[in-house]
Amino acid sequence: MIIQPRVRGFICLTSHPEGTAAHVKQQIDYVKSKGEIKNGPKKVLVIGASTGFGLASRISAAFGSEAATIGVFFEKPAAPGKPGTAGWYNSAAFEKQAQEAGLYAKSINGDAFSDEVKKQTIALIKEDLGQVDLVVYSLASPRRTHPKTGVAHASVLKPIGQAFTNKTVDFHAGVVSDISIQPVENEEDINNTVAVMGGEDWKFWIEALKEAGVLAEGVKTVAYSYIGPELTYPIYRNGTIGKAKDDLEATVPVLNDLLADLNGVSYVSVNKALVTQSSSAIPVVPLYISLLYKVMKAKGIHEGTIEQMQRLFAERLYNDVTPALDEKGRIRVDDLEMREDVQAEVAQLWEEATTENLEEISDIAGYRNDFFNLFGFNIDQIDYEAETNEVVNVPSIQA
């Protein structure tokens, strides 16, 4: 079939198998160009492995240190006349590239929040790898059915305490406007968001893996967070999502205690603002990112998702010394984004941004391009007018 992008708001409803494969290959080529990640991981579990930081982590481990990887994700397979999700195609492309390079790669498609998928994953580790020495937790889901209570929790994206009004942009149309978001009305919304996006499930995973004996001596585990500039605080860091991130970060000392007898360690890495399926949904953030890209590209310090994860692995997690942590015990690979000169210029551009000058003072074109790249579109070498085979399988899937 011929597959073109169909967009609804911040979601692209279609994805292109050849385009996603080319995008995955670009990321692999970047990691290979950086050379070996010395003393890197060798047996890796990535929970949330099909897109964004999780996919980039899997690529960095596999092609930076020749690691065997197991990826867990929840994606829609391709079917005749119906393209699969971008994450499905990403995973198929990753496995194909890994196998061609002689690397072990298998995947599990299912609800990572469930006890069932945890048990399935543990069985696969026992059968094929014995133990893992790195666990990456990179789930991004709007809802979670709690495996113990059966309660379905849905996250909300809202400020706390008072309404928030600021600029935002429709990044497809390039229209800058004001948006007002009403605050949460009750504590339940906050609790639900924490239940979905906080640290409890990360803890459940590590507990289950340890109890099963599949964590290696000296195991590391890392989860991802974001802080950002003050202008996004009301909707992000001081809002409902921020409460969930606080909970995620508070899980680190709990996991360190849990892993102490294995000489293991857990980290939260605070990453840079990037175009992801999740970040595109957050009001204010697309405008901020488009201005940030403009400034950082002009300074020659811009990084995409794969650059961030390769640097995290090579310079922080596996650099022969304990990684430098901030005052709250977090790894910071948002250091370039949060440089004073960068933030000062972004703040100035923020005040100036209008629909009329957006194309000139921001990198909204780069934002759009990165957005469509997520779904396999806007890749130079792909002919989007040509027929493509939409049915691409991931042979290793343990359904």
Image: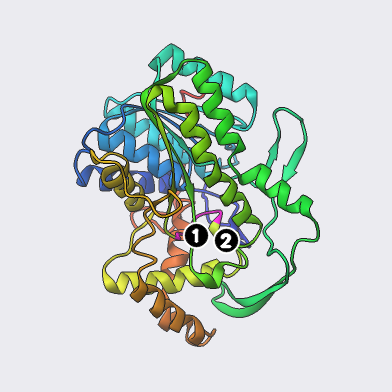
Secondary structure under tag 1 reads loop
> Could you say which is closer to the camera, residue 334 or residue 59?
334
The residue type indicated by label 2 comes to: Arg
Q: Residue at x 63, y 32 (%)?
A: 113
Which of the pair 79/395 is nearer the observer?
395
Q: Position of residue 277 (x, y in %)?
A: 54, 54
Q: Is residue 288 above or below residue 74?
A: below
| Disc 2: which residue | 237
Rendered location of residue 211, percent (x, y): 53, 17
Q: Residue at x 47, y 15 (%)?
A: 213
Q: Which amino acid, mark 1? A: Ile
Viewer-side residue, 250 vs 396:
250
Q: Is residue 274 magenta?
A: yes
Label 2 Cα crowd, 10 Å radius (few <14 / some 14-19 / many 20+):
many
Q: Residue furthest right?
A: 185
Question: Is 186 placed above or below 350 here?
Answer: above
Q: Which residues are magenta?
A: 273-278
* Badge 2 element: loop
Q: Which mark is residue 227?
A: 1
Quarter holding residue 115 = top right
Position of the C terminus by quadrant: top right
Could you say where residue 89 lies in the image, as x and y percent from the top left? 47, 39
- Mark 2 vs mark 1: which is more N-terminal? 1
Magenta span main SS: loop
Question: Which residue is found at the position 51% from the left and 45% from the top?
Answer: 86
Residue 11: image quadrant is bottom right
Determine if the magenta segment contains residue 360.
Answer: no
Q: Is residue 153 left or right of residue 376?
A: right
Q: Check contact, mark 2 vs mark 1: CB within 8 A.
A: yes
Does residue 229 appear in the picture of this structure?
Answer: yes
